Amino acid sequence: MVLRKRPKYATHILSKVFQLDSAAFLFRNGDDVYYCISDRHSPFVSGENPVAKISLIKEYNRPYQLRIGIRGSYHIEPLSYFVKDPREWIEWIWIIFPQSVISDLRLFLTEVCAFIGDKIQLWEVLL
């Protein structure tokens, strides 16, 4: 008998994987700044296939949460096209869904809302 391992902190109730155009994050460590990116259409690197696994999770006695995990190979690019110093950027992560999967994402969120039922708080705003 094989037991499925789960994270100790959360139970994944519903999940689905969505293709992404790109996912990137900015890592700042003092004066060191790195731009890590997985880009399906990168002019620099080929073969990257970023995807997002979106899950409805339940942690102990907390309300339901929506979790987004990113998968796929990535590369590090030097930041050479910015106007404002990256150490001062407010945003530090970007997830880009292509138009072709937006409808599937909406259907998944509808499924999540149906599962949660009358416990929906602000989820309905997404629909």
Image: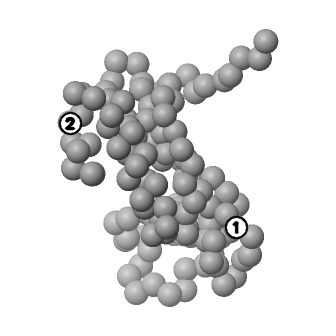
For image coordinates 55% across by 86% down, the residue present is 80
The mark tally for this picture is 2
Q: Which residue is label 1 attached to?
A: 48
> Along the horizontal axis of the image, is 61 left or right of 72?
left
As displayed, is residue 106 above or below residue 83?
A: above
Give whichever of discs 2 and 1 has the lower sequence position. Answer: 1
Where is residue 15? Give x, y as percent: 52, 39
Hey, what amino acid is under mark 2?
Gln
Where is residue 45? Give x, y as percent: 72, 77
| Residue 32 seen in this snapshot | no
For image coordinates 45% across by 69% down, the residue present is 99
> Along the horizontal axis of the image, is 92 left or right of 49?
left
Q: How crowded is mark 1: few (under 14 residues within 10 Å), some or many (20 or more)?
A: some
For image coordinates 66% across by 23% down, the residue present is 5
Which quarter of the picture shows residue 90? bottom left
Mark 2 falls on what kind of element? loop
Q: Give 95 or 19, whichever is nearer the viewer.
A: 19
